[in-house]
Image (cartoon, rainbow, N blue to C red):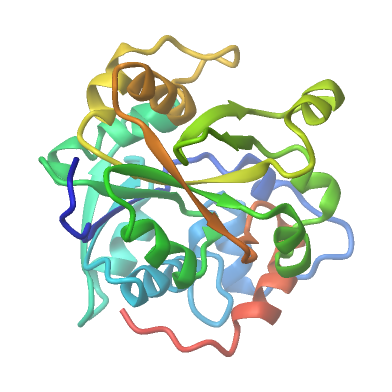
């Protein structure tokens, strides 16, 4: 089990942004926001600065100094921006996922960056508070953040009905992940109980995640999913500790999310 403090973070920014591309009634965007939204590049939506700047600044606040952006070959907007940006707290790296074949496949693109180190793995369209990221960095071995449902509802810009559809994590007697129920139906919600934690795809992964990601089959929607890779890693002997966090997470999935994210982050200092 590794006890070295992790310093590397992988941000999965390869998504097609289908929901962000869709027009939304009553949502007015400025020119820069419209360009990023039309391109489906959620991470570059401006909230004063690109949303991804805030995501990376929180990583730096939590002690992560090397950040790898997994992008597609068409994501010149991201690369051009960060290639031209002077940073003092983080070093930006890139990994290219040639085709959008799912989150586990995207993670495999960052294998060379990861090397033999543990890595934080997060989405590019979620802002995770530095508090939760620090707690994850302090965990030994592999881990994930289990978010308290009530705190998510209270502190996020995500409606409760959307949160109800997020993956649920249960914890065994040793504090490790016991079950991960994705898109839980009513029966699953009843079985797992109201105290089950919510997974928002905030992971700390050992190098064991890479052979696990190569070993899985495509999901029902035809993609290689990081959740399946985590399950495979656990089955192969790499347990994931669940770190409990009672904090909110901001979501930048659609045009309707932009104004609430601006309200939450618009005045926040960014230091990269």
Residue nearest the observer in this picture, 158 or 116: 116
- Residue at far front of view: 173
Which residue is located at x 42 percent, y 48 percent?
A: 13
Side of 86 relative to 189 (left or right): left
Report x, y in % for residue 60: 31, 73
In the rendering, at what x and y percent does residue 196 appear?
A: 69, 41
The part of the image, by quadrant, that contains residue 213 is top left
Establish if 263 lies above or below 237: below
Q: Is residue 265 above or below residue 184?
A: below
In this picture, is 88 found above or below 173?
Answer: below
* Residue at 65% in and 65% down: 248
Q: Residue 186 at what x, y percent from top left?
A: 86, 26
Q: How many marks?
A: 0
Q: Quadrant of the N terminus?
A: top left
- Image quadrant holding the C terminus, namely bottom left
Q: Is residue 28 left or right of residue 238?
A: right
Q: Position of residue 4 (x, y in %)?
A: 15, 56
Residue 99 appears in the rendering: no
Q: Which residue lies at the image location 73% right of the left edge and 30% below the top edge?
A: 192
User: Is 63 located above or below residue 122 in the figure?
Assistant: below
- The residue shown at (85%, 46%) is 161
Q: Nearer the viewer, residue 144 or 262?
A: 144
User: In the drawing, does residue 93 fall left or right of residue 242?
Assistant: left
Viewer-proximal residue, 149 or 26?
149
The image quarter in which residue 107 lies: top left
Residue 80 is at least partly visible in this image = yes
Image quarter of residue 271: bottom left
Q: Is residue 216 left or right of residue 218?
A: left
């Amino acid at each position: 089990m590794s006890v070295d403090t992790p310093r590397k973070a992988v941000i999965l920014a390869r998504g097609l942004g289908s929901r962000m591309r869709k027009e939304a009634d009553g949502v007015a965007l400025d020119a820069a926001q419209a360009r990023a939204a039309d391109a489906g590049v959620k991470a570059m939506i401006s909230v004063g600065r690109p949303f991804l700047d805030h995501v990376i600044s929180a990583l730096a606040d939590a002690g992560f100094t090397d950040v790898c952006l997994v992008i597609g070959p068409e994501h010149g907007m991201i690369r051009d921006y960060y290639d031209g940006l002077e940073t003092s707290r983080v070093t930006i790296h890139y990994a290219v996922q040639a085709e959008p074949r799912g989150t586990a496949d995207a993670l495999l693109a960052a294998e060379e960056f990861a090397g033999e180190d543990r890595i934080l793995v997060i989405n590019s369209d979620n802002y995770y508070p530095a508090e939760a990221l620090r707690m994850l960095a302090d965990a030994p071995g592999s881990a994930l953040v289990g978010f308290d449902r009530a705190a998510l509802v209270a502190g996020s810009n995500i409606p409760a009905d959307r949160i109800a559809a997020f993956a649920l994590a249960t914890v065994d007697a040793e504090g490790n992940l016991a079950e991960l129920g994705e898109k839980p139906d009513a029966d699953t919600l009843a079985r797992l109980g109201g105290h089950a934690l919510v997974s928002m795809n905030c992971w700390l992964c050992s190098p064991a995640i890479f052979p696990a990601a190569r070993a899985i089959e495509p999901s029902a929607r035809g993609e290689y999913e990081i959740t399946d890779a985590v399950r495979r890693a656990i089955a192969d002997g790499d347990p994931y500790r669940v770190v409990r966090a009672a904090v909110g997470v901001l979501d930048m999935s659609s045009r309707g999310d932009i104004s609430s994210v601006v309200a939450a982050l618009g005045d926040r200092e960014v230091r990269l």
